[in-house]
Amino acid sequence: MMLLAYLPIGCAVFLIRLFIGVHTFFVACLLRKSTFIRSVVLRIMCAILGIVVQSEGKRCSKVNIICANHVSALDHLAVDLVEPCVLPSVWDIPSIIRWCFGYIDLGARDGRDELVRRARQHVDSENLPLLSFPEGAITSGRKGLLKFSSWPCEISDQVQPLTIRISRPLFDISPSLLGSTWWADVAWFAFLPFSVYHLTWLPVLKRRENESVERFSARVEAGIAEHLGIVVTNLTHMDAVEAAKRHLHSRAAPTPVR
């Protein structure tokens, strides 16, 4: 009922933010990514757009691999406002689009080995840290984590875990619904009064002597799950994709006439 009463206001807010969002995009393109002024300006503009970011814990600038859970289509933006970073792109999109949105082509479409090789080159030669979402798919972040892919832990012997939570005062609407499109999820961010990202930087984890990559990755995953108060599952991103397909198929299936 409350959401229905907010509908006219939300539509007006959505249209205004759509206009402001275009200007925010150009500001993000014009200002140098690693500058302090860019972070300040974009955080203010994103707050107007309804995206508020709160950060806790200490970010270690000496560690260039960030591992985080994945709860929305705008997680990368929220982290980038606090700590300028890049995210490996898995889509075949023009270079200018990748650059504007903070993505980087590390050969993910050519396989895991190529991704790891080029990611190591980036970490060794570039200052901007590499953000990774080892779950490989968006989840609610309320029940459990998808099984982490271990590729971020192959790149470096130390990573910094990061937990991401989203709260929406007034309206308890999930930041991402099963089977929904990314643009529909983003539209909710613009429609609602505001959404608050809670980022918590956890202590840096280092790979132990003779520790396998898989065990190191499991420790990173367990640390994130423990801080979020959720469990680690054996479900993979492919399981999440299949669940979304089944959900969409059940919605599209015709109701039998009796």
Image (tube, rainbow, N blue to C red):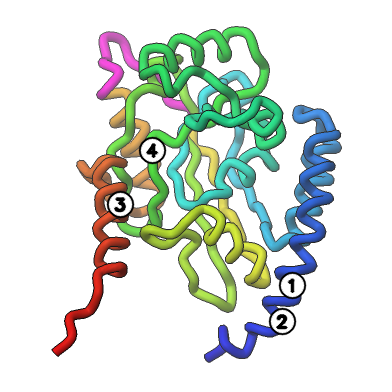
Sequence-wise, which precedes: disc 1 or disc 4? 1
Q: Nearer the viewer, residue 248 or 45?
A: 248
Say which residue label 2 marks: 9
Determine the secondary structure under disc 3.
strand
Q: Nearer the viewer, residue 243 or 155?
A: 243
Say which residue label 1 marks: 13
Q: In x, y percent, where is residue 115?
A: 44, 17
Q: Nearer the viewer, residue 126 or 103?
A: 103
Q: What's the residue type where badge 1 is placed? A: Val
Identify the residue at the far front of this view.
Answer: 257
Between circles 3 and 4, the one closer to the viewer is: 4
Q: Give the quadrant of residue 28.
A: top right
Give the magenta-colored segment's residue range: 204-214
Determine the secondary structure under disc 4.
loop
Compute the Cα span from label 4 to label 2. 35 Å
Say which residue label 4 marks: 136
Picture residue at 53% right of the left edge, 49% below the top: 73
Q: Dot 4 surroundings within 10 Å: few (below 14), some, or many (20 or more)?
A: some
Q: Quadrant of the C terminus?
A: bottom left
Compute the Cα span from label 3 to label 4. 14 Å
Compute the Cα span from label 1 to label 2. 6 Å
Compute the Cα span from label 2 to label 3. 35 Å
* Label drawn at residue 137: none
Determine the secondary structure under disc 2.
helix
Q: Mark 3 touching mark 4, by CB under 8 A? A: no
Picture residue at 69% right of the left edge, 84% below the top: 8
Say which residue label 3 marks: 144
Sequence-wise, which precedes: disc 4 or disc 2? 2
Q: In x, y percent, where is residue 111?
A: 37, 18
Q: Mark 4 touching mark 2, by CB under 8 A? A: no
